Amino acid sequence: MSKNRFSARVTVAAGFLLLCAAPGLTRAQGSPPRPPQTHKASPAARPKNDAQPTDDFAGLKYTDEKIDQIHQDMKSRMDLVVKDEKLSPDQKEAMLEGYRRLERGQVFKLLTPEQQREVRKKISARRAAEQEKKKKPSLPK
């Protein structure tokens, strides 16, 4: 009886492994790879900033080697994305923007609390100015 239980468990485990491995095996033997499908988003779905974001860290004095290391690390990652031929221009731009955001976040964490407050003030002032720009064109003339 225990042999029957053991053989049933082995059969179930082997079936499970076969189910997990089968998709990979069929992909390896299948047709040649198809080019990746790109989905074009409408311009209204994602606004594109043509201008580079302002440097919120300008004017701060810091001499930390960790910040230089962050810049070097992100630059090497960004260079790899630029050279990658598999990515579409939209994908490249999205990756580069993501790396820029990561870099700013990592640098922000290394700043002193006083410097962080100063950067937050610059960001809120810039956002307020952007909101004012958006409000002015919408007024009827």
Image (cartoon, helix red, strand yellow):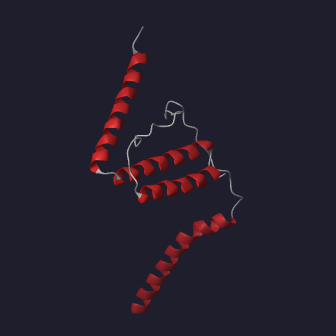
Image height check: is 22 above or below 46? Answer: below
Locate the N terminus and report the quarter of the image it occupies. bottom left
| Residue 1 seen in this snapshot | no
Image height check: is 43 above or below 119? Answer: above
Residue 43 on image: x %, y %: 53, 31
Q: Residue at image x 38%, y 51%?
A: 62
Q: Residue at image x 34%, y 51%?
A: 111
Residue 44 on image: x %, y %: 50, 30
Locate the C terminus and report the quarter of the image it occupies. top left
Along the viewing direction, whichever of 47 and 77 lies nearer the viewer: 77
Q: Residue at image x 42%, y 41%?
A: 58
Residue at the right extreme? 32
Residue 74 on image: x %, y %: 51, 54
Q: Residue at image x 64%, y 64%?
A: 27
Image height check: is 2 above or below 99? Answer: below
Residue at the top extreme? 141
So how many labels did they put on this image?
0
Residue 119 on image: x %, y %: 34, 41
| Residue 126 seen in this snapshot | yes
